[in-house]
Image (spheres, rainbow, N blue to C red):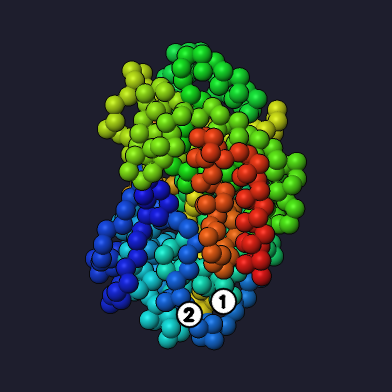
Amino acid sequence: MKWKKILCIMMAAVLAAGTAACGSDDSKGSGSDANGSNGTADEGGTKTDGDTKTDADNAGSNTDQEDNSGSEGASGTLKVAVVETAYGQDMWKEICTAFENEHEGVTVELTIDKKLEDVISSEMKLGNFPDVIMRAVGGEAGLTETFVKDNNIAELTDVLSMTVPGESATVGEKILPGFVDNSITNPYGDGKTYLMPMFYGPCGLFYNQGLFKEKGWEVPETWDGMWELAEKAKAENIALFTYPTAGYFDAFFYALLHESMGNDQFQEALKYGEGVWDTPQAQAVFDIIEKLASYTESTTPANANDNDFRKNQQLILDNKALFMPNGNWVIGEMADAPREDGFEWGFTALPAITEGGERASYSFFEQVWMPMGAENQDLGKEFIAYLYSDNAAGIFAEKGGAVQPIQGMTDKLDGDNKLYYSIYDDGAVAVMDAFATTDPVEGITVRTTFFDPINSLVTGDKSKDDWINQVKSDSDALREALK
């Protein structure tokens, strides 16, 4: 759980590391091991570290973005910088070699390191930028956020209309819906894409398929159906719900909020919009969570901490609770845990609020992008487009277990991975935004306002109205801190 989303920890010391042609052993990273989570890579909160701030004056010139035909016949050296995560280095080395093989005259210099910011920052301060950077938002040093904040990041909207190298489809046609129309990939709210989505990890509700088969129960498609199931389970001394810690309500809360509000109002809520928490859509969310708390296994809050959270996860394996919000890392976390006979992992999106309504699943994902000062932007865009090819996706999956958010990818998976990654193929809506980052507000954080109160709702120490009042008051303060 500790590496639920933060799976690569950056150190403060500056390391010297050279770049080397792709495939060379010289590109091997150094430093402490990245923590893994069954292939879920590198993301966490939105903390920004000023140590890696770059000078926008050294950014170089813009590139013409009107030609969407790619860079066929291009030659030269492409500089690619990648943070090393649990997926390892081998897949990136092979990707670069394959790109070189398909683009005669091109050499890819790959820099890959667990402490990427430390490795590339000194050169960037001198105006020497990589052409392509694979580093997502949420890193401890805040590299990506800094480039976005400084308007020092190249627009990549035209990459979406480029034909994937060696294929007939465009990049935009291959990417799953929702993965490029969010506040992470389109950070300026101008309808333009600056960060491209990479490896992803859906979050939803895990359950025991074996128990449902034994009881003849169906997984509810609506919250009304969930309450009916809750009563059936209660009659057999089984709780409807549990959660590892209150922090796991982030993905759950975002998905439920999107289901109720739709994207426009959802975006308003993420910016703590005035009056948004008084709307019927917001009230529906509060009502559902209040009722869900009443059906939550009573021991959950006592164990909802970093030391005991596995006890809550064990409730699913012991058939003491039906559903639990989580990501696919839980399969690895509980691999050696005892379980009831016939246990089989199941995974589903959140139930819809109304019959036939949206069913949502939050997804953490990584991003690849290009500094404004990149010298070889056309070739860089060709490389980014190549990352969405079937060939590249196959390399990522085979060599590192990383899965791209592209059409048809789940057909190539099997076992638990197929169950897990097929959630969007089955009609779930991908939700990927988060509450806006603000200047610090004393005594208030997103987690303490929106997620932690679930513990008090379950224990009865806080009422729904208490929570709503806190959300409104804290949102007023956070909204002011946005200005």
The residue to which callout 2 is attached is 54
**Of 394 and 308, the residue lying toward us:** 308
37 sits to left or right of 322 = left
Q: How far apart are marks 1 and 2 (CA)?
A: 8 Å
User: Contact (CB < 8 A) between labels 1 and 2?
Assistant: yes
Residue 107 coordinates in the image, percent (x, y) = 38, 71
User: Which residue occupies 42% across, 86% down?
Assistant: 126
Location of residue 430 by image quarter: top right
The residue to which callout 1 is attached is 150
Residue 320 coordinates in the image, percent (x, y) = 42, 23
Residue 313 coordinates in the image, percent (x, y) = 39, 34
23 sits to left or right of 43 = left
User: Which residue occupies 54% across, 86% down?
Assistant: 57
Q: What residue type is labelled 2?
A: Thr
Please state, as top left, top right, bottom left or bottom right, where the C terminus lies in the image: bottom right
User: Which residue occupies 37% across, 23% down?
Assistant: 318
380 sits to left or right of 224 = left
Q: What residue type is labelled 1?
A: Asp
Report crowding for label 2: few under 14, some 14 to 19, many 20 or more residues within 10 A (C-alpha): many
Location of residue 122 by image quarter: bottom left
Q: What element carries label 2?
A: loop
User: Which residue occupies 32% across, 64% down?
Assistant: 114
Q: Which labelled disc corresponds to residue 103?
A: none
**Of 388 and 55, the residue lying toward us:** 55
Q: Is residue 384 visible?
A: no
Mark 1 vs 2, N-terminal side: 2
Residue 195 coordinates in the image, percent (x, y) = 55, 63
346 sits to left or right of 34 = right
Q: Is mark 1 on a helix, strand or loop?
A: loop
Report crowding for label 1: few under 14, some 14 to 19, many 20 or more residues within 10 A (C-alpha): few
